[in-house]
Amino acid sequence: MLYHIWFQVLVMSVLVRNLSAIFVFVPLASCISTISSYDETTDASATQLQKDIDTFLVKMSSSPSLRDRYFSTNQSFYQKAAVDLDSLAIRTQSIPRNDLTVEQVGIIKQHLAEMALGHKGCLKAPWKEEQREAIRTKGVDASLGCRIEYGASLEVADRGQSAFNPVLAPEIKRQFDEAFGALLKLELEKKKLAGGES
Amino acid sequence: MNLDIADLGKSILGAFKDILKDSWSDTKEYAKGESKKMAQALAQITKLRALGQISEDEAYLLLEMQKNSTRAVLLTIEGIGLITAQRAIDAALKTVADAVNGAIGFTLI
């Protein structure tokens, strides 16, 4: 009986020691790789989103009809782009050591949120820090109104007939292209690191 | 008033260099490209405002977007943290604030 108890204690102590070794080993191993691996879904989703946003902005810069540039006419674009960006954000957040890409998706979400507010004429310069924070945390307001909780400078029920300024479209396109370009370049670097295409 | 893009770019690059000095050899090429893009964007905003094609609110929107786009580019450089990137942007804009604000006619930066 005494021998049996002694044996159990011995087994337990060996197990505890090995588990300690595992717990020490796992964090060290996870520190070796400092950046996430390449993600094909992130690459493809970001490329598609950039295409959708570019198409919208080309339409805004070239459409002579005021009605075609109303926010209400284009509300479905903002709704779809916001959903697509949320999916991309969730995807990138689920990948370990992916902080930089997560941050870049956040910047693109900010771009879209700011473009939507700008389209509705909801932003008055200069912005307050609380507005920037609201834009960062609340994301895209695809409703027809201006809502302070989403970063608007004023509360207005319906700005659906606010038209996109076509002169702004190429400038905003440049901003989206730069942010998407940075994200895709980082993915490309991860792919190179993994020994994929160069 | 037209802004000299080359001068703006040099000022911005100088500020990037001060802030990113520890990783300058790795980040120099990115910083060069980005300072040029930033200078072009600021000159374009100023030009569009001077022509009356965009409002002050729209100029401000473009500047905010440019700051975030620059942050996205800096984030591609591993090892450059968000705080360092923000410092670089703020310092870069500070160096050209007088020139841009003077040219555009209101406190954009």
Image (tube, rainbow, N blue to C red):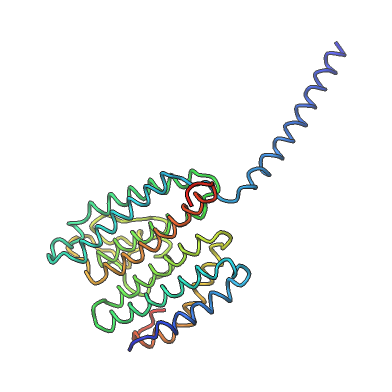
Pick whichever, A159 or B35, lies toward us: B35
Residue, far right? A2
In the image, taking residue B13 as reference, residue B37 lies left or right, namely: left
In the image, taking residue A1 as reference, residue A176 lies left or right, namely: left
Q: Quadrant of residue A72?
A: bottom left
Pick whichever, A128 or A169, lies toward us: A169
Q: Quadrant of residue A152?
A: bottom left
Q: Residue at x 68, y 44 (%)?
A: A28
Q: Quadrant of residue A11?
A: top right
**Where's the C terminus of chain B, which quadrant?**
bottom left
Q: Residue at x 45, y 57 (%)?
A: A185
Q: Is residue A105 above or below residue B94?
A: above
Where is residue B70 shown, x and y percent of the image? 45, 67
Residue B97 visible in the snapshot = no
Q: Residue at x 33, y 52 (%)?
A: A49
Where is residue B101 shown, x and y percent of the image? 39, 84
In the image, taking residue A20 as reference, residue A34 lies left or right, namely: left
Q: Residue at x 31, y 56 (%)?
A: A141
Residue, far top? A1
Pick whichever, A133 or A103, lies toward us: A103
Residue A46 visible in the snapshot = yes
In the image, taking residue B7 as reference, residue A29 lies left or right, namely: right
**Where's the N terminus of chain B, which quadrant?**
bottom left
Say how many tags the image has.
0
Where is residue B42 shown, x and y percent of the image? 38, 77
